[in-house]
Image: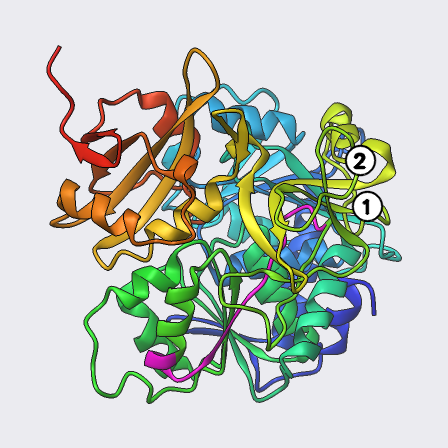
Amino acid sequence: MDTIAGLLHGIGDVDNRGVRCGDQFISWREHLGASRTRGAALRRVLSPDRPPHVGVLMENSVEFSLLLGAAGLGAFVLVGLNTTRRGEALAADIARADCQIVLVHAATRHLLDDLALDAVRVIDVDEPEWQTLVGSSVSSDFGVVTPDDLMMLIFTSGTTGDPKAVRCTQRTFAVSGQMLAERFDIGADDVVYLSMPMFHSNAVIAGWSVALSGGAGVAVRQRFSASGFLPDVRRYGVTFANYVGKPLHYILSTPEAPDDADNTLRIMYGNEATASDRDRFATRFGCRVVDGFGSTEGGVAITRTPDTPADALGPLRAPTAVVDPDSGLPVAVGEVGEIVNSAGSGLFSGYYRDEKATADRMRGGIYHTGDLAWVDDAGYLHFAGRLGDWMRVDGENLGTGPIERILLRHPRIAQVAVYGVPVEIGDEIEAVLVAHDLDPAEFGQFLSAQTDLGPKQWPHRVRVVDALPTTATFKTLKRELAAERTPPTWVRTGRTYHAPTAG
């Protein structure tokens, strides 16, 4: 079944499972009917002369799930609007996605105050206008839905540039959801936990669609809370949860209790967690943690196997390849290159209204991830950062990922971001650390003891900070750090770190 519409109809007679948020519950049977009604309501006010795009600027809720369902049934294209965007940047996203309508609720309505939104109708779902519109609409069908129909526009995180609107089809969600539901044996006895923002692909592809595919229940949290995670798992009987970025680390920072493993959680699935956090989380909470590799675009997916080394992404399997970004030829073992899909586009359907960016992704007829990796002697892929993270140090190309992973071995370093700072020739390496009671002399001794840290990989300068800037999905905004030009806490002379000399 390659459509979300088909998956929704497949559980449309289920009364004992559905979506919960706090004390609110709606069964899948009721969900299907409410989604159809909302689709009919919005169809009444959408102009047929413009793209049927409805922006949703809301935090997680049952209402958000109902709107996803309406889009899945073919009523309109849902545009996921990032609730951390502000001002003209948010207005530009709304315009770029051709939104006719933007739905907000009480917690987000203020984000549109004083914004010039030409010909865009704003509706607050917590106000009587929405209830009247929905209440006066008759549930209906919206025609035949096909796998290639556009269902949602999801903006990229914008960690290395302006966000782009990814075209996500029915197939994007249905195929991925079914694959993950089958992989993790998700069924009627499971409860999927959604605390990652539902405007982002991680929540929809690795959570909501998985529940639909397996016929599981869903527990929604308005926004992620590290301290609220375990209580929610126990309250709702959660068995599967998705994550992206650093949530595992944040949860691990909460106070431990002897009964932490006394819970229903079976699987934590996501990406970008460190190996140490995955291991600690699995041990502490008595579950399986699976970290995958993918992106909103869906062009490449790498799956870990049981024998994959802790610091690797997974085995290199065709059509995935690692190539030189300039020549397009496969790189040698141990050399850094770009991860590509040599067979074509995968599930990537292009960027909305951005033919140039789409063409750049599909150079030479293959999908380019923009992610760097190297392959070890055993054939496993190791992440090395983004193409924008590629640093040129003393004539050698270096990725930031391996350096970050080594620095995170230090017990008092909680988070790290590494990037290149342009100098007269090439780059110098700057490391920004979230750390406590870290001594510069001891830091240098620690680096000396890391036998896999090459001499050119030592940071030239270090900044110690209280927190790193992140996106709504907990990805570090390195471009903001690099743009700050803040003086370093320490600089390096030889193999010794010290405070910078005045003047």
Residue found at x 37% / y 21% = 483
The quadrant where residue 281 appears:
bottom left
Q: Position of residue 315 (x, y in %)?
A: 67, 64
Nearest to the observer: residue 456 or residue 214: 456
Quickly name the residue at label 1: 345
Residue type for callout 1: Ser
Q: Position of residue 25 (x, y in %)?
A: 48, 75
The answer to whether residue 150 is above or below residue 47 is below
Q: Position of residue 254 (x, y in %)?
A: 23, 67
The answer to whether residue 123 is above or below residue 280 is above
Quickly name the residue at label 2: 362
Magenta segment boundaries in residue numbering: 283-298
Magenta stretch contains residue 336: no
How many C-alpha atoms fall within 10 Å of the one at disc 2: few (<14), some, or many (≥20)? Answer: many
Element under label 1?
Answer: loop
Q: Position of residue 384 (x, y in %)?
A: 54, 45
The quadrant where residue 86 appears:
top left
